[in-house]
């Protein structure tokens, strides 16, 4: 008799747990990017200090000019490695969240299917058309979710290909 409030409380509890899990996964990814950025800045500061010390130790103008050429040269390898690490973090976070979403959507679909079966058993014979329309709507929503999931995976593949192209360009410039 009072199962509906219990179901609502249970569903809300599950939703809070799901949100917390998603938020923790996203926060973990952000945390890793922040740590990467801090380490990158620390490395740049150390390199800058080392370069400054080297410039101060130079005794003649010829050494200054030679050193300046190496200091001002862009370091595509470091940029490529940084971009790769950021991409890896984003990719790993996206995969983790996608997996959690797939599990959640599957669970919701299973429960929804069970509830639709219960409704169909208790519905009057005239409600067949409405039940068919409801099942069709659920099927269309599932299809849209699968299409979005495929598009997200294709986007990730394109991003991976672009990153590999960037790495190849970096290697070509480095060789030149």
Image (cartoon, rainbow, N blue to C red):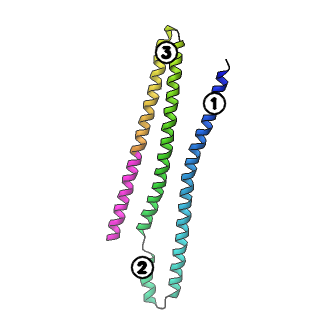
Please state which of the two labelled residues, at mark 1 or mark 3, is closer to the viewer: 1
Q: Which residue is mark 3?
A: 130
Pick out the residue farthest to the bottom: 59
- Residues in magenta, as a range: 155-176
Q: Locate residue 23: give its quadrant.
A: top right
Please tell me how crowded label 2 is: few (under 14), some (14-19), or many (20+) other residues with Cα within 10 Å: few
Q: In the figure, 148 relative to 46: above or below?
A: above
Residue 169: in magenta span? yes
Q: Secondary structure at mark 2?
A: helix
Instruction: Name the residue rendered at 64%, 34% in the picture.
Output: 13
The C terminus is located in which quarter? bottom left
**In the orientation shown, which residue stands out farthest toward the top?**
125
Which of the two marks, 2 or 1, is nearer to us in this view? 1
* 56 to the left or right of 76: right
Residue denoted by label 2: 69
Vertical relation: 97 (above or below) 143: below
Q: Earlier in the sequence, mark 2 or mark 3?
A: 2
Q: Secondary structure at mark 3?
A: helix
Whole-angstrom CA distance, mark 1 to mark 3, is: 28 Å
Q: Badge 1 is on which residue?
A: 10
Give x and y (percent) for residue 122. 54, 12
Q: Residue at x 41, y 41 (%)?
A: 151
> Label 2 vs label 1: CA separation?
66 Å
């Amino acid at each position: 008799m009072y199962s509906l409030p219990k179901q609502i409380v249970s569903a809300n509890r599950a939703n809070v747990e799901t949100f917390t899990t998603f938020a923790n996964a996203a926060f973990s990814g952000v945390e890793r990017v922040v740590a990467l950025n801090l380490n990158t800045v620390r490395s740049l500061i150390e390199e800058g200090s080392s370069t400054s010390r080297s410039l101060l130790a130079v005794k003649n103008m010829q050494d200054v000019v030679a050193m300046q050429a190496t200091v001002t040269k862009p370091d595509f390898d470091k940029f490529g490695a940084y971009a790769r690490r950021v991409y890896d973090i984003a990719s790993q976070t996206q995969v983790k969240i996608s997996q959690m979403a797939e599990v959640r959507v599957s669970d919701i679909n299973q429960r929804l299917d069970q509830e639709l079966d219960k409704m169909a058993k208790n519905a009057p014979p005239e409600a067949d058309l409405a039940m068919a329309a409801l099942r069709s709507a659920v099927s269309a929503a599932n299809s849209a979710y699968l299409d979005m999931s495929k598009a997200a995976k294709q986007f990730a593949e394109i991003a991976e290909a672009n990153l590999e192209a960037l790495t190849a360009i970096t290697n070509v410039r480095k060789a030149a």
